[in-house]
Amino acid sequence: MEPVERLVAIEEIKALKARYFRLMDVKDWNGFAQLFTPDALFDVRGALEENPVITGDPVQGRDAIVTYVRSGITPLTSAHFGHMPEIEILSGTEATGIWALLDILRAPEGGQFRIFRGYGHYHERYSRADGQWRIASLKITRLMVEAA
């Protein structure tokens, strides 16, 4: 891959991730679904705690991911941010990325928490098909959480 093609791919992946945050926070589930490959893997097990004990399996498949995120985020007001991406283009159709993250969640009164701030990293794999980059796998690791 030529250097300019590599830079274009990196910018396309940055735009993909920006859409991920925006579409989740505005709860545009149809648009959100289009960000993932049909067989995507979504691993956010333990994402609400530091040093979690991981049980169960990650969520697999675009439709299951949307259902999972929609059910968790719908009652909340959320703001998700990704910073300082480390994107590696492996080929014209495969890439990986690590993003520093901050997410802020505000729950309605009476919930498990009122305000949650999480800090950590997204570890992702991307696939390009039909001229579009999509998220093929996503895993969150936490460094710190604050919940009140």
Image: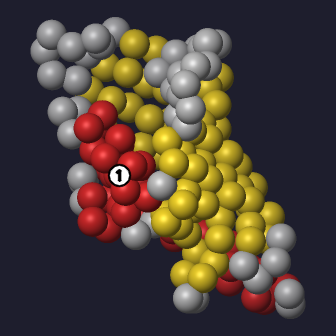
In the orientation shown, which residue stands out farthest toward the left? 109
Q: How many marks?
A: 1
Quarter of the figure that contains the N terminus: bottom right
Q: Is 139 rendered above or below residue 13?
A: above
Q: Position of residue 147 (x, y in %)?
A: 40, 13
Quarter of the figure that contains the C terminus: top left
Say which of 30 and 16 sits in front: 30
Q: Position of residue 106 (x, y in %)?
A: 26, 27
For image coordinates 42% across by 43% down, the residue present is: 80
Q: Residue 30 falls in which quadrant of the image?
A: bottom left
SS at mark 1? helix
Say which of 124 and 5 sits in front: 124
Q: Is 75 rendered above or below residue 146?
A: below
Q: Is 105 rendered above or below residue 93?
A: above
For image coordinates 30% across by 34% down, the residue present is: 72
Q: Amino acid at mark 1?
A: Val
Q: Position of residue 78 (x, y in %)?
A: 30, 38
> Which residue is identified by label 1?
66
